[in-house]
Amino acid sequence: MLKFTCCNQVRQFLEPAQAQVLRGIQRGFERECLRVDRTGQLAHTPHPQALGAKLTHPWITTDYAEALLEFITPPSTDPAYPLAFLTDIHRFSAQQLGGEFLWAGSMPCKIGEDADIAIANYGSSNAARFKEVYRQGLGLRYGRAMQTIAGAHYNWSLPDAFWPLLRDCCNADEPLQDFINRRYFGLIRNFLRYGWLVPYLFGASPAVCQSFLQGHPSDLTELAPGTLHGAYATSLRMSDLGYQNHAQDKLAISFNSLAEYTQALEAAIRTHDPYYAQMGVRDGDTWKQLSDSLLQLEAEFYAPMRPKRVGLHGERPALALATYGVQYVEMRLFDLNPFIDIGIAPEQSLFADALLLMCLFRDSPPITSREQGENDENKHRVVTRGRQPGLQLLVHNREQPLRALAHELFDDMAPFAAMLDAAYGGQHYHATLQALRQRIDQPELTPSAQVVAAARQHGGYFNFAFEMSKTHTQSLQAAALSPELTARFRDVAETSLTTQAQLDAEPQSPFEDYAAAYFA
């Protein structure tokens, strides 16, 4: 069995009275989603004005491309609220699209040439230009096609009242924020060890349009004309083909402590890279990227999970973390489920809650470079061939069956499902784990297997995803919002437009001074 830091900690929070503190867990989702036109091609229209200003809207923005919407839910202690609010955002947004559709899958539609993918424009202020130049740099470094991949992020934090109870239970005498930082980083390390279970259970990107590869070779096989797939793949989005980046392999950013993590990020945004320097930072007055460093910004570092902190005075992420400590974690492994109108199933957050609590309470020694290689290899095996019969993963340099390891993790999550059920009442967490556990021995129940079957049935990934996109968008458009909610969304959109107009109208310092001040 897997070992926990202290069985007393687990027992203490299994008591119904103590478990109540977990009702203060805060959750939120971010869901990315491409806009496509009536033929399923990437939309080349600007961000709809009825959705507000993407620079200043709290819930509706864009990620990389002008056509890549991002919907953000406010954090909430109500487990059902994030998906309910996300549904409302989708309904409101779909009703503003005119003849366009929300693309259902993580892997993009037929996107055309790299140069045809328009980068998001946020306005004329320095803050807006900064975001745009950063995206120009991402396109220069990794190609724009990679930036059209969409996923869902789960933001999660434990309540303030929980931490003193846990510290007392551990007989720890360190300052509370130091204790919080240490335990959150332990959680992250364990998630790096066991997070492969997420793409196995929820991966939904086993196939891609051939056009996405833009002529580059791959070891994928043809599923249907114009569609390539991995026969046992779960999440090509998280493979080398998708949102991964070998250019960052040399970064070696450690999650062994807050200090090591933030120092490594600081070094990465200040260490010049000869290849990026060769690309150039500026061409006259035109900025091509923010810098020629290994990372332009901390956000450029791709990781399955990141520690987060909102700065009190607009500090950069690494500086905010180093100054104030960890506030929450961002889990980044969820694919979009193309069978669901909002791309996310209710069981995903229930599963994540139990997994993250298990990762928090489990022993979490530092990750050596050897173990990091093992963790990376396990994730690679699962995302590229997770449903392969008899697949083995590495544990301390030994091959062990994925199915046995997955069942062991479900065994270890059981007390944390019980802990959450004690907090909220009912058996929702227990029932969710029981249902999801069936996917271990019946891989045909996984979303990735279902996507392969549906793509085959529709004659290709594009045909399937486009059909889902039309169906979902039309059903969202047909679902009436209450007049009060519609008015609220319109008011927030209008306020965001007014705020952006004010920012654009303000006198701006030279952009190079603005950028230098950010990195100072």
Image (cartoon, rainbow, N blue to C red):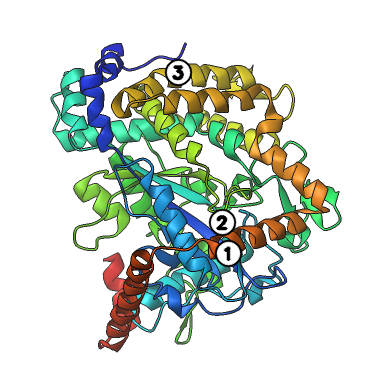
The answer to whether residue 108 is seen in the rendering is no
According to the picture, the residue beneath numbered tag 2 turns out to be: 150
Q: What residue type is labelled 3?
A: Asp
Query: Secondary structure beneath disc 2?
Result: loop
Q: In this view, does 5 lie to the left or right of 149?
A: left
Q: Give the residue displayed 28% in from the left and 50% down from the top.
A: 309
Which callout, 3 or 2, points at the residue further toward the start of the chain? 2
Residue 258, above or below 310? above
User: On the rendered image, what quadrant is the C terminus found in?
Assistant: bottom left
Say the numbered circle drawn on residue 260.
none
Say the numbered circle drawn on residue 412.
3
According to the picture, the residue beneath numbered tag 1 turns out to be: 34
Q: Where on the picture, by quarter, is residue 36? A: bottom right
Which callout, 3 or 1, points at the residue further toward the start of the chain? 1
Are circles 1 and 2 on residues that touch, CB within 8 Å? yes
Q: How far apart are marks 3 and 2 (CA)?
A: 31 Å
Residue 135, above or below 224? below
Residue 46, above or below 199? below
Q: In this view, does 393 lie to the left or right of 255?
A: right
Label 2 packing within 10 angstroms: few (<14), some (14-19), many (20+): many
